[in-house]
């Protein structure tokens, strides 16, 4: 018999009872090690670089790939490279989004160094910008210098509580123009106008559906899904699916990557409905446009985006990037062009980030690899 959403959820409840009766108490467990990097030891490492980087690995990044490789140089420098196996060739064919993720990483490192009275000087792409894709050349060279004049950043305190809140937002609670302006803070544009937001919502949802129905594009995401606490702890990156219902469905064979990838399956349909509900709940928007699309522009976008995300956190707002309509593969070009037209980007200008802000439920932090996994000799 075909199952609707209610039947699936009921089956999840039944599964919980079944596996609980069989003694598999782990269905109620959550990941045990995957979120440990968020629990920052109040006693920092003696090496300010390690202190900076333990904060930096908490940065938002596309598909939670965490592509940052760190090479410590001497006593006061570091080279940052891309783990080329962590790129997203189907949905990010030119590594634009991955590069933005390096911008968020570098900005959090800078803020953490400043907290210790250390200035972090940044040389982006010291051996040249890599096009059309990133390669083995460094993304940045960082130098750490004690400086009594360095200014601490008020947003630093919000790094451990920052989230990318992917849940539906409460549309009955409007985001005021004043709050949206505080999130943007001259580093981004914003809108709380219902009609304008509605126009953008349509393009966002169109692009989302295009990606979900494109086997190679969506398959890239499916391959990165970690189902249940055991998988998340074993591979604390990608897209995590956790919780009692997830554990129960997996235990009784009703949830796996094959079903999630099949547009005819109930798991796929429910997942799509849930994504559309979340992406369609847009009380307000912020976006970042760059004058060009250089690697330097992309790094700067990351810096500006993570600061907006931290400001949203400080104001009790959720924030969630919606990147499908900004991607560069041919199938999404119509939505891409519509977004750029609506947001007034002309000539060489490029809309680099588009995110919704609003009031959402509390969410747990995304999984993270520990810092030592990013360090290379």
Image (cartoon, rainbow, N blue to C red):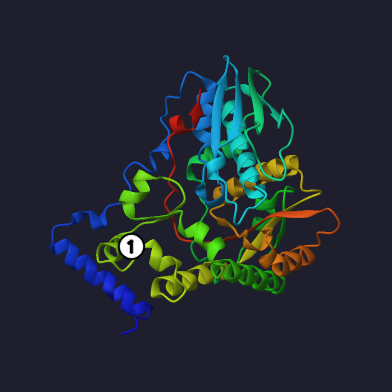
Q: Secondary structure at mark 1?
A: helix
Residue projecting furthest to the top: 75
Tell me the residue at 81%/62% (across/down). Answer: 344
Q: Quadrant of residue 369?
A: top left
| Quadrant assignment for the N terminus | bottom left
Where residue 32 sits: x, y (%)? 31, 44
The residue that disc 1 covers is 246
Please determine whether, in this image, residue 24 is positioned above or below residue 295.
Answer: below
Task: Please tell me which residue is depicted at 46% across the width and 24% down the height of the picture.
Answer: 44
Compare residues 348 and 186 and report the one nearer the observer: 348
Residue that protrudes farthest toward the bottom in the picture: 1
In the image, 344 versus 262, the foreground residue is 262
Q: Residues within 10 Å of mark 1 (few under 14, many from 20)?
A: many
Judged left or right of residue 244, residue 224 is right
Residue at 76%, 66% (x, y): give it. Answer: 337
In the figure, 175 relative to 304: above or below?
below
* Residue 363: x %, y % from top left: 44, 55
Residue 68 can be seen in this image: yes
**Residue 74 at what x, y percent from top left?**
58, 14
């Amino acid at each position: 018999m075909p199952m609707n959403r209610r039947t699936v959820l009921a089956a999840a409840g039944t599964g919980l009872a079944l596996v609980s009766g069989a003694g598999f108490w782990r269905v109620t467990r959550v990941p045990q090690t995957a979120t440990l990097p968020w629990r920052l030891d109040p006693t920092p490492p003696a090496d300010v670089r390690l202190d900076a980087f333990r904060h930096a690995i908490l940065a938002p990044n596309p598909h939670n790939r965490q592509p940052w490789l760190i090479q410590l140089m001497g006593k006061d420098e570091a080279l940052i490279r891309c783990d080329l196996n962590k790129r997203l060739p189907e949905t990010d064919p030119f590594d634009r989004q991955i590069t933005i993720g390096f911008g968020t990483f570098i900005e959090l490192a800078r803020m953490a160094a400043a907290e210790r009275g250390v200035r972090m000087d940044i040389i982006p792409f010291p051996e040249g910008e890599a096009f059309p894709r990133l390669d083995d050349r460094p993304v940045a060279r960082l130098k750490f210098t004690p400086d009594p004049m360095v200014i601490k950043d008020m947003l630093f305190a919000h790094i451990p509580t920052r989230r990318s809140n992917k849940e539906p937002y409460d549309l009955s609670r409007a985001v005021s123009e004043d709050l949206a302006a505080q999130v943007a803070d001259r580093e981004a544009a914003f809108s709380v106008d219902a009609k304008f937001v509605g126009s953008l919502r349509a393009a966002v949802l169109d692009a989302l559906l295009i990606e979900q129905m494109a086997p190679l594009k969506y398959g890239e995401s499916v391959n990165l899904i970690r189902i249940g606490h055991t998988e998340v702890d074993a591979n604390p990156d990608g897209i995590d699916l956790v919780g009692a219902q997830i554990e129960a469905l997996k235990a009784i064979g009703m949830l796996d990557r094959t079903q999630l990838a099949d547009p005819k399956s109930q798991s796929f349909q429910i997942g799509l409905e849930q994504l559309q509900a979340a992406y369609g709940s847009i009380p307000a928007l912020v976006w970042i446009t760059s004058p060009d699309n250089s690697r330097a522009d992309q790094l700067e976008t990351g810096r500006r985006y993570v600061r907006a995300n931290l400001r949203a956190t400080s104001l009790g707002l959720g924030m969630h990037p919606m990147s499908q309509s900004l991607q560069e593969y041919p199938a999404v070009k119509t939505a891409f062009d519509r977004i750029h037209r609506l947001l007034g980007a002309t000539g060489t200008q490029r809309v680099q980030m588009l995110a919704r802000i609003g009031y959402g439920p509390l969410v747990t932090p995304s999984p993270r690899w520990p810092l030592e996994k990013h360090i290379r000799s």
